[in-house]
Amino acid sequence: MEALFLTPEELEQLTGRRRGKEQRETLDNLGIRWKVNAAGDTLVGRRHVEEVFCGFGAANTERKKPNIGALSR
């Protein structure tokens, strides 16, 4: 059974960074959500990363806005 969260080694490979703050900045730029636990470790869900890289996650955080002008025709 796969672990729920990425290992520290996987997180370093994903971000190309060793330090937590730099990893979190890179994760933000990739559109990957993360949390910090009580021990100060960065937690990243394995399934979320897979979804982002497969095009199903929250990587594109740009919201679509309705075209209100289309309603006035």
Image (tube, rainbow, N blue to C red):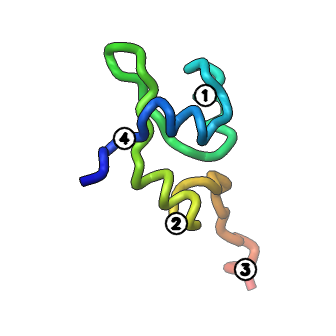
Q: Earlier in the sequence, mark 1 or mark 2?
A: 1
Q: Earlier in the sequence, mark 3 or mark 1?
A: 1
In the picture, which quadrant includes the N terminus? bottom left
**Amino acid tagged 2:** Phe
Mark seen at residue 70: 3
Q: CA distance from mark 1 to mark 4?
A: 15 Å
**Marks 3 and 1: which is nearer the front?**
1
Do the residues bearing badges 1 and 4 touch, measured as CB atoms within 8 Å? no
- The residue where tag 2 is placed is 56
Do the residues bearing badges 2 and 3 touch, measured as CB atoms within 8 Å? no
Q: CA distance from mark 2 to mark 3?
A: 29 Å
Tell me what residue is drawn at x 61 percent, y 28 percent. Answer: 23
**Amino acid tagged 3:** Ala
Tell me what residue is drawn at x 41 percent, y 23 percent. Answer: 36
Find the residue positioned furthest to the bottom.
Answer: 73
**Amino acid tagged 4:** Phe
Q: Is residue 25 above or below residue 58?
A: above
Mark seen at residue 23: 1
**Amino acid tagged 1:** Gln
